[in-house]
Amino acid sequence: MSTTQIARPAARASARPSHLYQLDLFRVITFAFVIFMHVLGATTFPQDVHSDAIEGLLHFTRQAFFALSTFVLVFQYRDRPMAVGKFWRRRVPLVAVPYVLWSVIYWAYSLATADQPPASTGASLRALVIEIATGTAWYHLYFLLVTLQVYLLFPLLMKLVGVIRRHPWLVLAVSGAVQIAVTFFLSHPPASVDYTTITRFYTTLLPYQFYSVLGAVAGVHLKAVHSWVLRHRWLVLGGLVVSLGIAEAGYFWNVHNGLWPEVASDAFRLYLIPWFVAAIAAIYLAGARWSEGRRRGSKAISWAVDRSFGIFLSHPLALALLSPLIALVGDGAGAPWTTIVVFPATVALTLLIVEILRRLPVSKVLTGRPSLRAVAAKVA
């Protein structure tokens, strides 16, 4: 999750690892939109028609990262054997340990800021165990739980690399059909299925599987995908505009027909699927164009990528700590000024938190990266 360093195939094991610079910008752009989406949600009312119209589009970030995560893994292992046990021992703790620790942090923060004290210590601990098991300690931690599922199922996916190599469009078609069926089920569940059951799907890989498969196909066929995106950049941008129109038309049509804006803008709407795919392609295009040019701002981009996992984990805490600012600006200026003020403040406070964490001996388990002192000692 926190690296774009890609090893070359085994046949070139002695060569220096390559670096896919386009993924650096891809990651930074997507994380910026993640923070903006959460800030927008915190600084507007849940049923604000116009802000929800934007939030629906911003859900592309989760699909983009599942595509990116699988892309990186498949590209790394597509031409060399993988020892399953070694893979799990290396990858799973890098996500599982921070996931558990940050679940505890957010659980403790919730207890400390609750209006009423907990019923009992035992009840609070039981709630923590449930939250860790379900990815609900805070609203963004489900992503890590799903990422762990990607890691656990990745060896099975690698057995399909030959099929992906020979029949990429068939694989995408089958996965896409499953995605449409799952999305339809989640957005139009049978009356016999209660809402609690539906929400349990959100922390599983199933609602995101198509985007992981899309990343896998791109990882196997990177050269062809990269060339096609660059050659057809106007088609990619045109698809972005058209899919944007489809997404917004679907949203406003549903709102007009009585669906709550917050529901009409959730991530599991059929009219959002083309937009998600187009947004992923467009951001990759931006990264590809940047990587093949002068790569302006590359030091800042690399700095942000190195801290990206920590930024993801801690930015909701920064946003929560800024609640007095949200109230102050909201009462005085209202929308959209609250969002405009709080977004850069959230970014700044998040970066401060991450810089503090990176200087602690426990940086590895909190940010997925070794402490800056350990990095400096290794370089020296």
Image: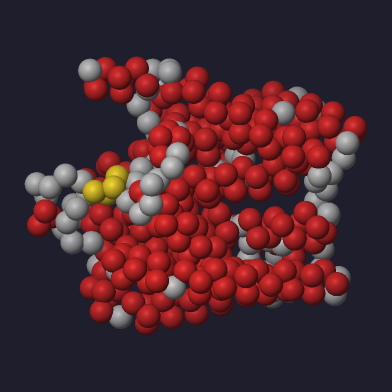
Q: Please give the name of the residue rendered at 70% of the width and 55% of the height, measured from the top-left corner.
A: 55
Residue under the point 63% across and 66% down: 268
Q: Residue at coordinates 35% horizontally, 65% vertically from top-left?
A: 226
* Front residue of 156 and 375: 375
Q: Nearer the viewer, residue 112 or 291?
A: 291
> Foreground: 173 or 83?
173
- Residue 360, quarter of picture: top left
Query: Where residue 379 sits in the image (x, y, percent)?
Result: 24, 22
Residue 363 makes an appearance in the image: yes
Q: Quadrant of residue 334?
A: top right
Q: Tell me residue 44's x, y (percent).
A: 80, 46
Where is residue 40? Give x, y as percent.
Answer: 72, 46
Q: Say which quadrant the N terminus sits in.
A: top left
Q: Quadrant of the C terminus?
A: top left
Q: Position of residue 247 (x, y in %)?
A: 68, 70
Residue 92 in view of the camera: no
Among all residues in the image, which is located at the extreme front? 294
Answer with the quarter of the image where residue 231 lies.
bottom left
Quick one: 335 or 141, which is closer to the camera? 335
Q: How is the image coloured?
A: secondary structure
Q: Is residue 133 left or right of residue 327?
A: left
Image height check: is 34 above or below 252?
Answer: above
Of all residues shown, which one is farthest toward the right? 332
Q: Which residue is depicted at the point 67% across and 74% down?
A: 246
Q: How many marks?
A: 0
